[in-house]
Structures are given as C-alpha cells and as structure tokens.
Image (cartoon, rainbow, N blue to C red):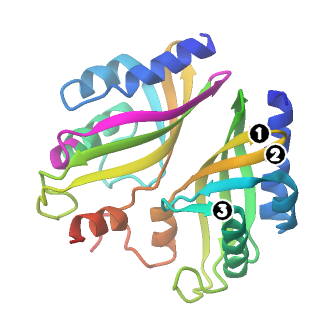
C-alpha cells in the first residue's frame, strides 16, 4: 500500500463514533491487532481488537457517548503513520467512579500506527489525557 | 533539507539533549522562534523550554533515552522513544523518591531552514505518576 493509502486508512479510522465503532474497528484493525499498551491497560480487558472495542464501548462511550476525533497532523513513511489529534466528549455517564458532570472535556494525543496489507496491525499511543487530568477537569468549577 | 537530513537532525537532537545532557545543542539546533508543545498542554518558548530541561535534568540526572522508531515526511519527523531515569531530585513538587521509572513518549518535530522549529510531545504521564507512587495503579483504590 502507498503512503497516501495508509493515510486514508487512518483518516477513516478517525471517523469513529459511538454509532459505527465496532464496524470501523472490524473493518480497519487487523484481526491480530496489537495495542502497545501505553497508558497501561485496564485490568481484565483482553488484548487486541476485542479489548479495544470493550474499552471504547464500556468506558469511553459509556461516559462520553458523543466522543469525536479530529486529526491535527498526519505524517507517514513506509508502513507507519503518526497522527496528532484532538478528541472531545460530554461527560454524561459515570467515568472512573465519577458521576456525570455534564461537562465537555477535550484532550489531545499522538498515536503511531503500523499498516500491513491494508489493515492497522499495531498501535502505539501517547496520550496527555490521564486519570488525574480528567478528574481535575471534571471537578473544576 | 531532505527527509533523511531531517531524521539525522532529530536523532542528534534527541541523543545530545537526553543522553549527553548537552542542552547547549538547543541553542544550536532550535530556531529562534522555537515552540515546544508540552505534554501537559503548555506551550514553551525556547528559553522556557531550556529552563524546563534543566529542571528535568536535575530531577532525573541519569536519564537514558532510546529511540524505538523514527520516520519522516515533508518537514515533519516522528520519534517514538523510551526513557529510563531515577528520580533523584524534586520534580513538579514531588520530593525525590529514588525510584527508577521507565515510560514511553512520541515527539513530532517540524523542521524549517535546517532547524527544529516546533516539537509536539506526548508522554505516558499516567504510567510515570504511578511509578513514582503519586497515583495508584488502575484497579486499586
């Protein structure tokens, strides 16, 4: 696949919403997808594609059902794509034990994807969002 | 500058600032209007970034950085890296714990006129805070 096709694949991945999440993950992530775990995973979640779907459905979309992603920068070479992105959502469900606040939260992150045969095979994620940051935003006046 | 020259510039920058502790390379390799987009969301000028680097160096004097992946397109370079360091000095209000930490990060560099004009940096801050004992691991109270 060309670098432009790899970038288009990642653009499609970032069209993820609560409505299409499972479809997008099955379409774009390889069945043997490896999620290189940083931040550390939630205990009890399976690895790979299934764990990602569960964490998105049960944690992210449960707490922030309107979560959306916007790509700020996209760089690709060979089989790798790096994305710098912003995401936001409204806190309408319980998150990390915190009752819904109704607040809109925004965060940014950088992710690297390795593409093999038209699918995302591996992900490395570096996320400024961390539990204390989100809790602080939720609790702030 | 070519993509290969950009990658070499970033490699040198990362090696010298982290592993050689040579912060004077910031003056040499960063543009005068350099902006550092910190993982916590703050934007730092060149002078503020140098001050932050000195403070980080004092907190973690034995830091070792290893580049895990480096790729580039156009005027941008992506660098994924692993840092190990011992917490020997005060860091963001946390007194020295003596703990050895390891965490990953992804930096995106923008190159202009053979200099580093911007860095966007994202780190696994949560993992680092957990290792320093400030935040309990997920799943534990």
Would you say A50 lies left or right of B122 here? Answer: left
Question: What range of the chain is rendered magenta?
Answer: A61-79
B60 within the magenta span: no
Looking at the rendered image, the quarter that the N terminus of chain A falls into is top right
**10 Å crowding of disc 1: few (<14), some (14-19), many (20+):** some
The dot on residue B112 is: 1
Q: Are marks 1 and 3 on the same chain?
A: yes
Q: From the top left corner, tell me how far across and down residue B94 is, in percent.
A: 52, 85
Classify B85 as above or below A16.
below
Dot 2 or dot 3: first in sequence order is 3
In the rendered structure, are the residues bearing label 2 and label 1 in contact, judged by CB atoms less than 8 Å apart? yes
> Which residue does the numbered mark 3 point to in the structure image?
B45
Image-quadrant location for residue A58 = top left
* Residue depicted at 54% across the width and 18% down the height: A6
Out of A48 and A113, give the one closest to the viewer: A113
Q: Chain of mark 2?
A: B
Q: From the top left corner, tell me how far across and down residue A21 is, in percent.
A: 26, 28
Out of A51 and A59, give the one closest to the viewer: A59
Q: Are marks 2 and 1 on the same chain?
A: yes
């Amino acid at each position: 696949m060309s670098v432009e096709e790899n970038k288009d694949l990642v653009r499609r991945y970032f069209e993820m919403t609560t409505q299409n999440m499972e479809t997008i993950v099955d379409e774009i992530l390889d069945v043997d997808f490896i999620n290189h775990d940083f931040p550390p995973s939630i205990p009890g979640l399976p690895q790979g594609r299934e764990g990602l779907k569960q964490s998105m459905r049960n944690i992210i979309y449960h707490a922030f059902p309107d979560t959306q992603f916007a790509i700020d920068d996209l760089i690709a070479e060979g089989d790798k794509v790096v994305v710098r992105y912003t995401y936001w959502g409204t806190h309408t469900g319980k998150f990390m034990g915190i009752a819904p606040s109704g607040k809109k939260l925004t965060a940014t992150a950088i992710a690297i994807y390795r593409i093999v045969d038209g699918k995302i095979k591996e992900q490395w994620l570096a996320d400024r969002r961390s539990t204390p940051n989100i809790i602080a935003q939720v609790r702030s006046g | 500058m070519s993509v290969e020259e950009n990658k070499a510039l970033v490699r040198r920058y990362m090696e010298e600032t982290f592993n050689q502790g040579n912060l004077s390379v910031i003056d040499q390799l960063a543009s005068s209007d350099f902006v550092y987009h910190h993982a916590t969301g703050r934007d730092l000028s060149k002078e503020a970034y140098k001050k932050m680097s000195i403070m980080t160096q004092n907190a973690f004097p034995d830091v070792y950085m290893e580049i895990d992946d480096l790729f580039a397109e156009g005027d941008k370079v992506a660098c994924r890296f692993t840092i190990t360091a011992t917490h020997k000095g005060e860091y963001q209000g946390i007194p020295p714990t003596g703990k050895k930490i390891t965490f990953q990060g992804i930096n995106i560099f923008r190159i202009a006129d053979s200099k580093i004009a911007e860095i966007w940096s994202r780190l696994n801050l949560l993992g680092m805070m957990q290792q320093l004992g400030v935040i309990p691991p997920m799943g534990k109270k």
